[in-house]
Image (cartoon, helix red, strand yellow):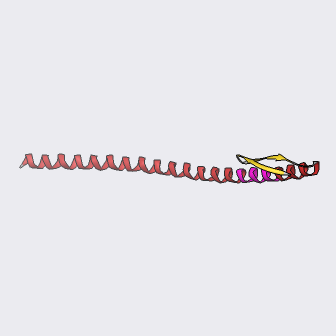
Amino acid sequence: MRLTRLGRLPIVKPNSEEGAIEVSEKLVKTLETKVDNLIELSTELKLENQALKKRLSDLQHEKRDLLERHRQAGDLIDQSINRLKTLENNT
């Protein structure tokens, strides 16, 4: 039996029928392992994606809160300046 590599999947050139079955079983096991690894990776990526979406949502909420506080602070500054101008004009 001779195995050569083309990319990641071997090209099988067995010397006998038993060799072909043995190689086929090895290929199936290899593919099963790769599929299992991909499923595990997919699960990890899904969890990471969910965490990132939650973080994004939290940051967007925080941004909205900060923008509102910034607007309120600006309003208070404007009011204070107007009061100071009024006091200055009354003197």
Decide which of 82, 9 is in the foreground and name it.
9
Residue 8, x across and y down, in percent: 72, 48
Decide which of 78, 15 is in the foreground and name it.
15
Question: Residue reaching furthest right?
Answer: 17
Is residue 34 one of those drawn in magenta?
Answer: yes
Is residue 28 one of those drawn in magenta?
Answer: no
Decide which of 63, 83 is in the foreground and name it.
63
Residue at 82% x, 53% y: name it: 29
Residue at 37% x, 47% y: name it: 67
Judged left or right of residue 64, residue 5 is: right
Question: Residue reaching furthest left?
Answer: 91
Q: Main secondary structure of the magenta part?
A: helix
Residue 83, x across and y down, in percent: 17, 48
Judged left or right of residue 66, residue 11 is: right
Q: How many marks?
A: 0
Residue 71, x across and y down, in percent: 32, 46
Residue at 72% x, 50% y: name it: 39
Q: Magenta span covers which residues? A: 29-38
Residue 56, x across and y down, in percent: 50, 49
